[in-house]
Amino acid sequence: MRFDESRPIYLQIAEHFCDKIMNEDWPPGERVPSVREIAALIEVNPNTAMRAFHLLLESNILVQQRGVGYFTTSTAKSKVVEMRKEQFLNEELPELFSKMKQLGFTPEDLQKKYQKWEEQN
C-alpha cells in the first residue's frame, strides 16, 4: 500500500478497508485480518492500524468479537456507501462546482456529458 503524505495514514488504511468492503473482497460477516496482521502487511505501527480499526468500529462497519477477531457487519457495505456519498457531497462536489464555474461549464453541459457517458456504459 502506498501512502499519501498529506493525509493521516490511519484514514488511508480505513479507506483501504472500505474499498475491500465495496469490492466485496470482505463480504458481510467476514473475518478481517487482525490489527497485527494488517500492521505487518502494510508496514505500519500497530497503533496506527488500531486507529483505523477504531474508526470503522465507531462507524459500525466492523464489529469485534472478543477472543475471535474483527468482522464486517451485515450493513458494512451500505454504511460505506453512505459515508462515501457524504464525503462526495461535502468535499468533492463543491470542488467540482468550483472548477466548472472557473471553466465556464453550465449544469446543462454536465447533464449532456453525463447522458453521453451513460449511453456508453
Image (cartoon, rainbow, N blue to C red):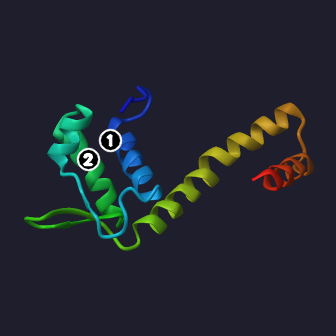
Camera-nearest residue between 25 and 1: 25
Which of the 4 quarters of the picture holds residue 95? top right
Say above or below: 38 vs 60: above
- On residue 51, which mark appears? 2
Secondary structure beneath dot 1 equals helix
Which quadrant is home to the N terminus? top left
Numbered tag placed on residue 10 in the rendering:
1
Residue shown at the point (81%, 38%) measured from the top left: 100
Nearer the observer, 19 or 89: 19
| Position above or below: 75 against 31 | below
Q: Which amino acid type is marked by label 2?
A: Arg
- Which residue is painted at 18% across and 48% down in the image? 35
Of residue 41 and residue 15, the one placed in the foreground of this image is 41
> What residue do we see at 11% from left, 65% from top?
68
Residue 105 x/y as whole percent: 88, 40
Farthest residue in the left direction? 67
User: Decide: marks 2, 1 in contact (CB < 8 A)?
Assistant: yes
Task: Give the mark nearer the N terminus: 2 vs 1.
Answer: 1
SS at badge 2: helix
- Inspect the image, locate mark 1, and give the three-letter code of the amino acid beneath it: Tyr
- Furthest toward the bottom, the residue is 74
Which residue is outermost to the front? 120
Q: Can you give x and y, in whole percent of width and height, for residue 30 in the image?
A: 29, 65
Q: Is residue 66 left or right of residue 104?
A: left
Say above or below: 58 vs 11.
Answer: below
Q: Characterize the local packing of mark 2: few (<14), some (14-19) or many (20 or more) Cα atoms within 10 angstroms.
A: some
Q: Is residue 104 left or right of residue 82?
A: right
